[in-house]
Amino acid sequence: MIIENAELIKYRSGRVNIKKKETAAYAEILNKARNNIIKEKFTKLKMYTL
């Protein structure tokens, strides 16, 4: 029973890490798309980063 629980915890934590990576990759794709749309719509707009 303890071994099964340990395996389940390991599996769940692995899934959480995968979900975090997927979410980060998805956010990066959305940010790039948003920036491209802004550049196309507002060609004279200058973007500054802090």
Image (cartoon, rainbow, N blue to C red):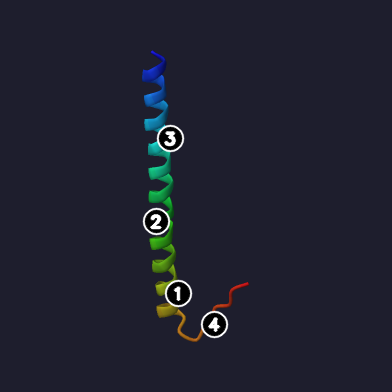
Q: Residue 46 lies in what quarter of the image? A: bottom right
SS label for mark 1: helix
Residue 24 position within the rendered picture, expressed as x and y whole percent measured from the top left: 43, 54
SS label for mark 3: helix
Question: Local crowd at mark 4 within 10 Å, few (<14), some, or many (≥20)?
Answer: few
Q: Residue 6 lies in what quarter of the image? A: top left
The quarter of the image holding the C terminus is bottom right
SS label for mark 2: helix
Label whose residue precedes the other's in the sequence (1 or 2) = 2
The quarter of the image holding the N terminus is top left
Question: Local crowd at mark 3 within 10 Å, few (<14), some, or many (≥20)?
Answer: few
| Residue marked by disc 4 | 46
The residue located at (38%, 50%) in the rendering is: 22
| Residue marked by disc 3 | 13
Label whose residue precedes the other's in the sequence (1 or 4) = 1
Residue 19 position within the rendered picture, expressed as x and y whole percent measured from the top left: 40, 44
The residue located at (37%, 31%) in the rendering is: 11
| Residue marked by disc 1 | 38
Please name the amino acid that badge 2 sits on.
Ala
SS label for mark 4: loop
| Residue marked by disc 2 | 25
- The residue lying toward the viewer, choosing from 25 and 42, is 25
Which tag is nearer the camera, tag 1 or tag 2? 2
Mark 4 to mark 2: distance in Å?
Answer: 26 Å
Question: Local crowd at mark 2 within 10 Å, few (<14), some, or many (≥20)?
Answer: few
